[in-house]
Amino acid sequence: MTAGALLLSAVPAHATASPTQIATSKSTGVTYLKSLQAADGSYVTGGGLSNEWAFSALAAAGTAAADVTPGGDPSKNARLVYRNQLAVAGWPGGSPVVTDYERAILNSYAAGIDPARVGPGRNLIADAVAYWQTAEPGYYGPSANFNGTVFGLLALAGAKTQTGTQRAPQALLNASVTAVRANQHNDGGWNYSKAAGDPTALAQGSDIDMTGAAMASLCAAGVPNTDPAIVVAKNFLKGKLASSGAFNAMFGVNTDSNGWAVSGLNACGINPQGTDFTSGTGKTPLDFLIAQQFKPGGGFKYLPTDTSPSPYASVDGLRAVAGAGFTATPPAPVTAGEPTWTATTGFTAGTAARLALVVDDGTGALKACTVTLTPTGSTATLGDVLDAAGTATPAGCVTAVTPSTGGGTVTAINGTANSGSSTWKVSLDGATATGATRATVVHLGDTVSLRYGS
């Protein structure tokens, strides 16, 4: 089963919560999330985009963001408004962090917006890759904030191309898989902070929420659910199951923690209502989540004792009940004229654009960076990308290229030269690799992967 399929794996019909209960939960949950939309079509609250996670839950429940409109006004549909917000040059503010971009990747993808082609100047994939940690390959953003690495892997593995192809090279994903594995605690779970290399931290108790996210990140990147890391993580969650079907989280029983844990199980193709996750009283995590949902309103409580719904808990609860991980393939809109995907198709001459670049010389010393170039037409060339890589973020991705001009075959990068059957090849957005030439045409939003080998 593919990672994309895992993210959308359905709850089996024999589960404790019946298919009818699940269908009703999804339907009423969607109704509640629609009620959160502002009059201008936005899901923005305050100065941030905290309710944008609604797009992943809506998609998981089968509702396209393009069909979500305030008062039936299609000119203000949620997808269009969200895309316009992301495309603004000043988004996400003056002090962005990597999780801003990772969150946007997962939710724009679910909304049917190609995250690499939001606009001529907005490539969310490249925005995230700019936070690659050269000194600690596989980490995104400061490694102490392990959350950034987990969601980096979730975003780059989960947000596929419009045709369903994995756009990030597997070598890039594998580097983060290694980092996630190194941070697994002795009890089988994970926490928000870095633990790798620190015996004291690794011996600390794990967090339910982060365990679900970390599991999902590994499985989205292709790790099977039979892998020892996933098996012990599943056992950690199993050990936290209460009689109510809830997981005993670090901060007490709540919908958000349960939702993240279930999304982790969903992403890994593990039935959250199977024998392992059915309590002695016959309750499962889905039973608990559905019990937290107001009827007929559809919103979910955060705490069982709450008397009103929480938008954030409603997103986490619905996405989990709908059988998804932390994103979902966008459903086709039912609104006439609205395509499944929306994207900018070409560079705008004179407008600076960013591209994600990965350089793999075959030695394991993987380099990843974001290149900014100002195109002169609707397409660019690999030569343009390599020339601009001298000032990439982070630095050092490309230090030397032969030839340095023209459109011919690339014979050497960073001192590694073509030799016999081992040559430099290029792949764009996960397509079949071909011999790298400076004249290779590169399009807006392409993830450019250069690999040395036979």
Image (tube, helix red, strand yellow):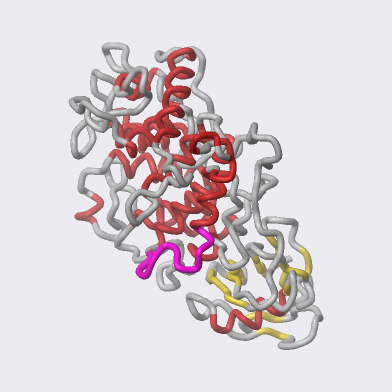
| Quadrant (top left/top right/bottom left/bottom right) for the N terminus | top right
Residue 405 drawn at (x, y percent):
75, 88
Residue 397 drawn at (x, y percent):
55, 77
Residue 415 drawn at (x, y percent):
63, 84
Q: Residue at x 49, y 14 (%)?
A: 19
> Would you say 370 lies left or right of 308 here?
right
Q: Is residue 295 above or below residue 387?
A: above
Q: Is residue 415 above or below residue 213?
A: below
Instruction: Work out whether residue 343 or residue 77 is closer to the camera in this orientation and state it.
Output: 77
| Displayed quadrant of residue 317 | top left
Q: Is residue 163 above or below residue 396?
A: above
> What's drawn in magenta, residue-wise?
86-96
Res 239 visible: no
Instruction: Work out whether residue 201 or residue 34 is closer to the camera in this orientation and state it.
Output: 34
> Would you say 296 lies left or right of 70 here?
left
* Residue 88 shown in magenta: yes
| Displayed quadrant of residue 96 | bottom left
Residue 177 drawn at (x, y percent):
46, 53
Q: Is residue 445 above or below residue 317?
A: below
> Would you say 121 lies left or right of 214 here?
right
Q: Residue at x 37, y 39 (%)?
A: 212
